[in-house]
Image (cartoon, rainbow, N blue to C red):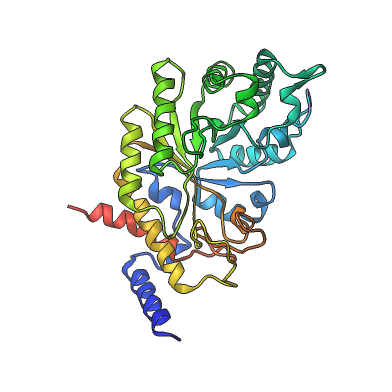
Amino acid sequence: MSKKVLFFCLGLAVLLASCTTTRKDAKEISLAEAFSPYFPLGVAVNSATVDSSQDLIRKHFVSLTAENEMKPSLIFPRMNTWITGGADAIANLARDMAIGMRGHTIVWHQQTPGWIFASAGGPASRNQVLERLAVHMDFMHERYGDVIHSWDVVNEAISDAPGEFLRPSPYLDRIGPDYIAEAFRLARAHLPGTKLFYNDYSVLDPVKQDKIFRLVSELLADGVPIDGIGFQGHWSIYYPDGATLERAIQRFSALGLEIQITELDLSIYNHDDQTSRFDSPPPELLELQAQGYQEIFEILVRNSQYITGVTFWGVADDSTWLDNFPVRNRKNWPLLFDENQEPKPAFFAILQSLENFDSAP
């Protein structure tokens, strides 16, 4: 064993030893119960993991998000046709657990069926697209309104390109630059009783953050019914630092918006790393991941008056979207539970964040 690996392993041992919670008594702990004084913990699931990971789901989470099965291309592939099997399985688990769901998502430039933007004579008109959105919302509310407590109404509408505000999309083409406002107005009318969120990634990037802040500020100034902003939280063991996260939370909460971390995971690869170097997660990277999760949760707990939910994007490392993004067939280990659905160092680290907060002067 190299000195570097030995150093990290020793550091990991110290980290775990510092936690009151041990692997023996981890089986007795519910993360949802531990964090319930601060915010609810949720998890994204799909029609496979609701079965394969159900024990973990029932023990540790109090909100579900459909990873894909409620996106329009899957549930509403053709006019007047809904395919609900996967979404029903997830919603029925939430009902059986007596917990709620985050609806994900209504308006997105991806995974939206092309027919929504077309008519027999060519492109659909503005009114046609808006009417189809209203019909879809009505269906989703009728079928799932008893269990969904909030919706990602618009997802990833801000451009990553320098000097460009809104991302090019069929919604922008067919409806116009007010399509985001119109989507939220429709959602308030057709998804009553739910909290309405704008959801995006790279919210902590300074340039994109300014664009998102401009968007939600303009929506609020125009009286558009928006309740909160979702920070997707697809981060890594190298980013973000706690100060950057805390500044963003406080900046958006100053607008009176709820903040939710909607899609949390910590990749062991840096964002621009296209390699596939590891057959198993190196101990030193698991330690960095644990430290990253602990810092994030210390910030979230300290700012819990602004946080109304934290959702992990997946249950355990045996099945994660990062296994195929941004590199196909590259195993990643971004969550709190390993491939055997056992707690990882990160599990103990986020519990340590609570102990640190509770013991602070």
Give the residue displayed 66% in from the left and 13% down from the top: 127
Q: Residue at the top extreme?
A: 127
All told, the count of numbered labels is 0
Give the residue displayed 60% in from the left and 24% down from the top: 172
Residue 245, compared with residue 106, is above or below; it is: below
Q: Residue at the bottom extreme?
A: 1
Give the residue displayed 34% in from the left and 66% down from the top: 19
Where residue 186 sits, quadrant-wise, is top right
Where residue 101 sits, quadrant-wise, is top right
* Closer to the camera in the image, 30 or 267: 267
Residue 17, compared with residue 125, is above or below; it is: below
* Closer to the camera in the image, 132 or 63: 132
Residue 61 horizontal/vertical position (percent): 50, 47
Q: Specify whether 328 is left or right of 151.
A: right
Q: Residue at the left extreme?
A: 361
Residue 262 horizontal/vertical position (percent): 49, 42
Residue 214 shows up from this direction: yes
Q: Residue at the right extreme?
A: 120
* Closer to the camera in the image, 223 or 261: 223
Residue 304 shows up from this direction: no
Q: Specify whether 52 is left or right of 338.
A: right
Where residue 113 sits, quadrant-wise, is top right
Residue 31 horizontal/vertical position (percent): 44, 52
Residue 335, compared with residue 3, is above or below; it is: above
Which quadrant, please, contains the N terminus? Answer: bottom left
Residue 27, compared with residue 58, is above or below; it is: below
Residue 354 horizontal/vertical position (percent): 32, 54
